[in-house]
Image: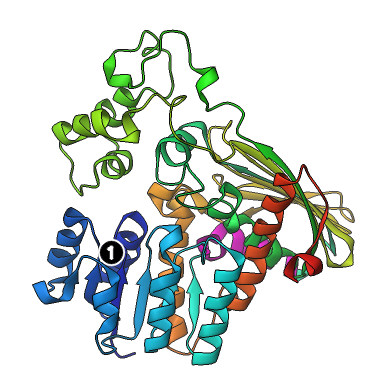
Amino acid sequence: MAKRKVIAIGCGGRGKTYTDIMANLYGEDFEIVAVAEPVDARRNYMKEKHGLSDDMCFKSWEPLLELPKMADIAVIATMDRDHYGPAMAAIEKGYDLLLEKPIAPTPEECREIQHAAEEKGVFVLVCHVLRFTKFFIALKNIIDSGEIGEVMNIQHIEGVGDVHQSHSFVRGNWGNSDESSCMILQKTCHDMDILAWLIGKKCTAVQSFGSLSYFKRENAPEGAPERCIEGCPHADTCPYNAIKLYVDDKGDWFRCAATKEIHPTDEQVIDAMWNTQYGKCVYKCNNNVVDHQTVNMKFGDDVYVDFAMSAFTKGGRVIRIMGTKGEINATMDGDKIEVFSFITRQTRQHDCNSTATGEGITSGHGGGDEGIIFALRELLNGKKSKSVCTVGESCDNHMISFAAEQSRLEGGRLIEMKQFEK
């Protein structure tokens, strides 16, 4: 296919990941021609990586999208609350979008983006990267083959992981819903989407319970200072010691997030420990999103789903799918899916090699990050994989998260989806 031109709006972890994959794996298919990113280090990285001129590097999206349309695709990977403006402006210009999830932080904005794209005739590929992993594609294929009959129940766990929770959803950019969005949307619209995709039916009712129970001030150990760097008497035993996580361990993801630098030095990390949330005691931050939540869902034809999201795990997704002819048991960070047949009373092992790249965000979501860019390439070439969904389908599945949060806030009230949509 002809090389497609791309503009990138928001070049933090996700924007950088998608454009790096475009350049490194599919450089013959994609060309990054302009970027908009407020952080100097990130914008300069994009400039050097993609050979951009100064006049094609912008500190905000507005001046970029005021220019005549210059590319085929706009990658939008800003913070959650900053998706709506550039998405609507890019759609109006006629750009196709690769849009980081969630689509937007409110149901109204999600639907407005959907309707604008449909009216303009552009596609919006939302970054539900789990759809593009070998693991979930294998699960979908097994279900669609009829091997386990009709799906009756699913139990699904999103183990956020205790350290991931502390980094992203306590200290980090997504810890406060007033600045980003609610946890069940920002973290697990992945999972709401994948469950609806696996089942292949509409969600009809939702009930949810959840709270912020542990990562709060009253649970701070005695004598803990406001910042770990001030000298905490519990430093050696605390799993969330910021000095260990950000200074000693040298993990790129944590250090880059804390400093907003591409290749941070120890001095820059220590400065962040003194001056940003990343250096705060994990029990003394401004976080308000839940650290554990459950969602009960009813889908068409009386299919029931129990979903749990919890910080209190080492991390990873676990799923059990119960059908009329058999059941599936699997963990995403494993390389085997177990399929038990009621007819043969035998268990077979399905190889999906999901550990090739790992499940976590630092290792590409089990291959999903690379998978979605490959799928985008194929879509532009007229080939639509079964993993690709329309923005309307994505919006429908976002509504499950919005309804779940409404239910949680109302003490677990059962919410009928048709009424919620109205």
* Residue at the extreme left: 54
**Could you tell me what secondary structure mostly forms the magenta stretch?**
helix
Q: Which residues are magenta?
A: 128-144
- Residues 83 and 41: in front is 83
Q: Quadrant of residue 56?
A: bottom left
Task: Find residue 197 and report its horizontal and vertical position in percent.
Answer: 67, 67
Q: Is residue 27 above or below residue 314?
A: below
Task: Find residue 151 and report its horizontal and vertical position in percent.
Answer: 82, 61
Q: Is residue 378 above or below residue 12?
A: below
Residue under the image location 43 percent in, 17 percent down: 238
- Residues 9 and 19: in front is 9
- Please name the residue that numbered disc 1 is placed on: 20
Task: Find residue 295 and report its horizontal and vertical position in percent.
Answer: 73, 48
Q: Which kind of residue does numbered mark 1 sit on?
A: Asp
Q: Quadrant of residue 26?
A: bottom left
Residue under the image location 22 percent in, 55 percent down: 39
Observer able to see residue 294:
yes
Q: Is residue 108 left or right of residue 154?
A: left
